[in-house]
Amino acid sequence: MSARKINDLINPNGTGDLDALVRRARELGALASALARALPADLAADVVAANVRPDGELVVVCRTPARAARLRYEDRTLLAAASSAGENVNRVTVRVARP
């Protein structure tokens, strides 16, 4: 692949083919950070990732099953934080990241 073609793919000006993917990754990172900021510090460190599905389901990924159980009790906090971040959410699912 030529250097020009690679540059077209990863164009930092937002016109490259990978721009939508990079933008979405940044959005998901910002969402996970917003959720972590709304949680107690001991739980915040265990939030690995977050996503919002088209039907409004907020999916939060954490490190361990024990933390997943604890995060499920924070569903209102998570919904409020996601809403404050501009997401249209209506329920929360907490999952455990695979090692």
Image (tube, helix red, strand yellow):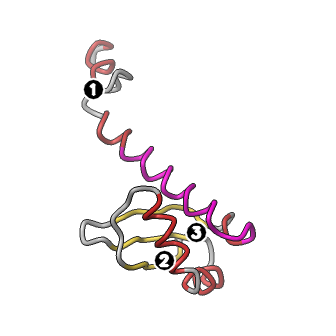
Pick the quarter of the image with the C terminus: bottom right
* Amino acid type for the residue under numbered disc 1: Gly
Residue under the point 69% across and 63% down: 45
Residue indicated by mark 2: 95
In this picture, residue 35 sits left or right of residue 87: right
Q: Residues within 10 Å of mark 2 (few under 14, many from 20)?
A: many
Could you say whether the residue bearing mark 1 is in a helix, strand or loop? Answer: loop
**Horizontal and vertical percent for residue 91?**
38, 79
Pick the quarter of the image with the N terminus: top left
For the residues marked 2 and 1, what is the alpha-carbon distance in whole angstroms?
A: 33 Å
Residue indicated by mark 1: 16
Which stretch is magenta? 24-42
Could you say whether the residue bearing mark 3 is in a helix, strand or loop? Answer: loop
Tell me which numbered mark, 2 or 1, is placed earlier along the sequence: 1
**Horizontal and vertical percent for residue 12?**
38, 23
Residue under the point 36% across and 70% down: 89
* Amino acid type for the residue under numbered disc 3: Pro
Q: Residues within 10 Å of mark 3 (few under 14, many from 20)?
A: few
Q: Nearer the viewer, residue 69 or 78?
A: 78
Q: Nearer the viewer, residue 32 or 6?
A: 32
Tell me which numbered mark, 3 or 1, is placed earlier along the sequence: 1
For the residues marked 3 and 1, what is the alpha-carbon distance in whole angstroms?
A: 33 Å
Residue 36 position by quadrant: bottom right
Q: Residues within 10 Å of mark 1 (few under 14, many from 20)?
A: some
Identify the mark at residue 99; answer none if there is no mark: 3
